[in-house]
Image (spheres, helix red, strand yellow):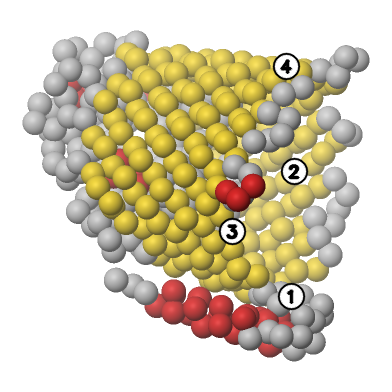
């Protein structure tokens, strides 16, 4: 196993413990290390999927943790390092094919290593190794880090989040405005243990079909030097927030998004909630490869997505209704290895990425206890995708479906402060026709999915 980064962390930890004078300033580099801080977490995750009829069911129990160190600033500079480990404590055979359909496991493998279903203990990863320079309310960070943007984000719904290597700048010295952006040249996706170039990272997850119905050939064949991102977030008054983002994937595609969120206060203390979002994509150059069979984004293609939300909030309660329309101009494509989609209709455990000509509608209710100990969210949605035979607009041949989610979270106090429990239940039903073929059913629709998660942070 690769324990080198844990040795480095242990050495830093020993240095930090050697501090005895409790200085408040960092006059030397040694001061900066001695006055740094550690963070860590332990996590256990039980996941199970109950598929329809005689199709295979799955379960897995994972456990692991992470340790991170961040030095104190020294003349504006500081550094961070950290990593994580993970083990498969028990599971069904995640590498076995379903005997009826030949399908592979979809969800539980994501707790471990999607590239090796039988990797049960070599699951450690260096996730953070960065150097930062900060001034006033701005900073520039170079190295491996965790970024949160609309289309590249931690998507932390398994054991370890997605991480990136690059240079990232954040400027916050303009009142009510945040400007951020940078260049990324490596990604370590969720559910993997290695780092990949941008091109290599596209295609680690299931690849789907080309627009002509043939198997996509882009895994290991996408050519891209990196991803450039720029985001501007502006608060207008007390209640309006505007966002503008552009993501340029060199030689592959470009995604631009604009979003407005407005909360309208009422006299009784309630609030009305409104949100509107528009996303446009275009192919760049040859879409990743001059051979169309090996390109990720078809040359000359485009997609357009409109998403809207409205809702109401009273005290601890919030009710939201959302609608998303992917037009028939083309498939909305965004590597699933990089993050979850930002649309208002997103519900955990499924995406509309890979599809065009989509209508999606959701209703959600959220209750957060005044003490912040409890948070309960339930949602229900209908997702009208093109017929599974219309692969030009349905990359994964996924039937139209309906989905119900419940997410219950509890933060412990007292002697158990730092411990958080989470229960997630997902049910997905079928709307679209599958023509009697269960390969369009298994791990997709007519299924129930269970998650029990314990997190302890310190």
The residue under label 3 is 458
Determine which residue is flagged by label 1.
73
Q: Determine if residue 394 is in view.
A: yes
Q: Position of residue 457 (x, y in %)?
A: 56, 54
Q: Is residue 401 left or right of residue 152?
A: left
In this picture, residue 424 sits left or right of residue 50? right
- Separation of marks 2 and 3 at Cα, in angstroms: 31 Å
Between 8 and 180, the one lying in front of the other is 8
On residue 233, which mark appears? 2
Identify which residue is drawn at 65% across, 55% down: 181
Residue that carries the numbered disc 4 in the rendered image: 312
Outermost front residue: 415
Q: Position of residue 101 (x, y in %)?
A: 13, 28
Q: Secondary structure at mark 3?
A: loop
Relative image position of residue 131 (x, y in whole percent): 62, 73
* Mark 1 or 4, nearer chain start: 1
Task: For the N terminus, give its image quadrant.
Answer: bottom left
- For the residue pair 274 and 128, the one nearer the viewer reads as 128
Counting other residues with Cα less than 10 Å from the Cα at mark 1, is it few (<14), some (14-19), or many (20 or more)?
many
Q: CA distance from mark 2 to mark 4?
A: 23 Å
Return the residue nearer the eye: 260 or 332.
260
Q: Nearer the viewer, residue 6 or 21?
A: 21
Write the residue at 17% across / 29% down. 56
């Amino acid at each position: 196993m690769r324990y080198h980064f844990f040795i480095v962390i242990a050495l830093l930890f020993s240095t930090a413990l050697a501090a005895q004078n409790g200085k408040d300033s960092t006059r030397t580099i040694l001061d900066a290390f001695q006055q740094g801080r550690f963070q860590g977490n332990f996590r256990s995750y039980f996941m199970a999927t109950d598929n329809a009829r005689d199709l295979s069911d799955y379960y897995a129990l994972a456990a692991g943790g992470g340790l991170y160190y961040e030095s104190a600033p020294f003349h504006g500079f500081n550094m961070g390092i950290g990593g994580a480990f993970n083990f498969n404590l028990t599971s069904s055979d995640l590498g076995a094919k379903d005997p009826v359909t030949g399908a592979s496991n979809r969800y539980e493998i994501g707790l471990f290593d999607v590239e090796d279903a039988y990797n049960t203990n070599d699951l450690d990863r260096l996730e953070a190794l960065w150097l930062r320079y900060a001034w006033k309310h701005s900073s520039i960070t170079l190295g491996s880090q965790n970024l949160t943007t609309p289309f590249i984000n931690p998507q932390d719904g398994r054991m370890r989040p997605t991480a990136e290597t690059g240079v990232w700048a954040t400027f916050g010295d303009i009142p009510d405005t945040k400007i951020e952006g940078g260049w990324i040249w490596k990604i370590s996706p969720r559910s993997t243990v290695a780092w990949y170039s941008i091109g290599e990272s596209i295609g680690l997850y299931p690849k789907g079909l080309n627009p002509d119905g043939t198997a996509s050939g882009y895994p290991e064949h996408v050519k891209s030097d990196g991803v450039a991102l720029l985001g501007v977030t502006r608060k207008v008054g007390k209640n309006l927030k505007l966002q503008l983002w552009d993501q340029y994937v060199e030689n592959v595609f470009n995604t631009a998004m604009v979003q407005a969120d407005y909360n309208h206060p009422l006299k009784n203390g309630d609030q009305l909630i409104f949100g509107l979002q528009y996303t446009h994509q275009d192919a760049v150059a040859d879409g990743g490869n001059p051979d169309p069979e090996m390109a990720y984004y078809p040359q000359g293609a485009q997609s357009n997505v409109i998403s809207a939300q409205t809702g109401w909030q009273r005290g601890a309660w919030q009710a939201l209704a959302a609608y998303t329309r992917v037009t028939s101009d083309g498939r909305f494509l965004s590597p699933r290895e990089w993050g979850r989609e930002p649309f208002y209709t997103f519900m955990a455990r499924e995406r509309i990425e890979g599809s065009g000509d989509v209508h999606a509608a959701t209703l959600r209710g959220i209750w957060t206890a005044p003490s912040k100990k409890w948070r309960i969210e339930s949602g229900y949605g209908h997702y009208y995708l093109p017929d599974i035979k219309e692969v030009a607009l349905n990359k994964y041949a996924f039937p139209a479906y309906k989905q119900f989610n419940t997410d219950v979270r509890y933060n412990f106090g007292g002697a158990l402060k730092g411990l958080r429990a989470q229960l997630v239940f997902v049910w997905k039903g079928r709307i679209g026709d599958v023509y009697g073929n269960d390969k369009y059913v298994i791990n997709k629709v007519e299924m129930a999915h269970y998650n029990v998660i314990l997190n302890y942070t310190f």
